[in-house]
Image (spheres, coloured by chain):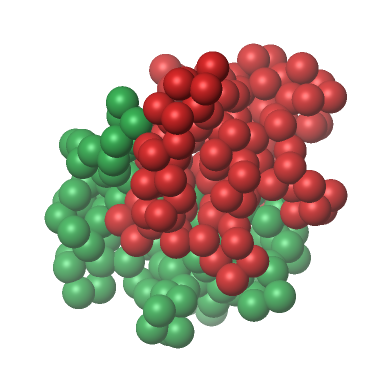
Chain colours: A red, B green
Amino acid sequence: MADEKTANAKPVAAVLEAINFDSNGLVAAIAQQHDTGEVLMLAWMDREAVTKTLETGRVHYWSRSRQALWPKGDTSGNTQSLVEFRIDCDADAVLLQVNQIGVACHTGKRSCFFTAVRGGKLETIG
Amino acid sequence: MADEKTANAKPVAAVLEAINFDSNGLVAAIAQQHDTGEVLMLAWMDREAVTKTLETGRVHYWSRSRQALWPKGDTSGNTQSLVEFRIDCDADAVLLQVNQIGVACHTGKRSCFFTAVRGGKLETIG
């Protein structure tokens, strides 16, 4: 266990170093279903959320409304397992390619992006 | 022309009303290639960028670094045409399904998310 922890410590530190966290210590995180390409949600991560996600393979966010670490699916069971962690060119956004268990959205929809502007009107889809 | 403007005015107002812009008047915008599902970039939009995007069908952002309206591809020619505009469940993020001409990233990469954490290391992909 100690060895495993040591093995992970350096890579996680390199990732934390690479990311440009904003003045609130957060980075925007897009979650995308790894095989279908569906964009599931946009949330935020702090250093601890990034660390926990990389160390455990289970996606953690920072809940801005609850101001707390948010292990995704903790109450709903709708967890996300990490398939790939990507960082953008200016390192102020990350893309999490995940395997979503159940639904991503608290409304019960698979994706949070279920409102579309169609024919000039807001329409619920999906 | 006047009629066209009037026809668009109301739907755009409804979309602006629906979006929860942050304290800086911005909303996070994910751009995704509409047919392949590739996530291209994350940027920000203000009310004017949303309005111009919906009215013209060409994606506009707000450049936080330049503090100015950013008609995507204005200098590079790498424009994005809007295929679908979606809003998330709490209306603080939008998903733009687009047709990207050329590349999305200023580095010349198709997607801004070209750095992956693989085997515990940061790796350039794509």
Residue A67 in picture, x, y percent from top left: 80, 53
The one of A103 and B100 positioned closer to us in this rendering: A103
The one of B42 and B83 positioned closer to us in this rendering: B42
Q: Quadrant of the C terminus of chain A?
A: top right
Residue furthest to the front: A2
The one of A93 and A106 positioned closer to us in this rendering: A93
Residue B78 in picture, x, y percent from top left: 21, 60
Q: Residue at x 69, y 15 (%)?
A: A102
Residue A35 in picture, x, y percent from top left: 42, 17
The one of A74 and B10 positioned closer to us in this rendering: A74
Q: Quadrant of the N terminus of chain A?
A: top right
Q: Residue at x 51, y 61 (%)?
A: A21
Seen in the picture, residue B32 relative to B65 is either above or below; the reply is above
Seen in the picture, residue B83 relative to A39 is either above or below; the reply is below
Residue furthest to the bottom: B67
Q: Residue at x 44, y 61 (%)?
A: A20
Q: Is residue A63 left or right of residue B66?
A: right
Say whether residue B44 is visible.
yes
| Image quadrant assignment for residue B38 | top left
Seen in the picture, residue A20 relative to B38 is either above or below; the reply is below
Q: Is residue B103 left or right of residue B85?
A: left
Q: Is residue B20 left or right of residue A91?
A: right
How many numbered marks are there? 0
Q: Residue at x 71, y 32 (%)?
A: A71
Say whether residue B94 is visible.
no
Q: Is residue A90 left or right of residue A70?
A: left
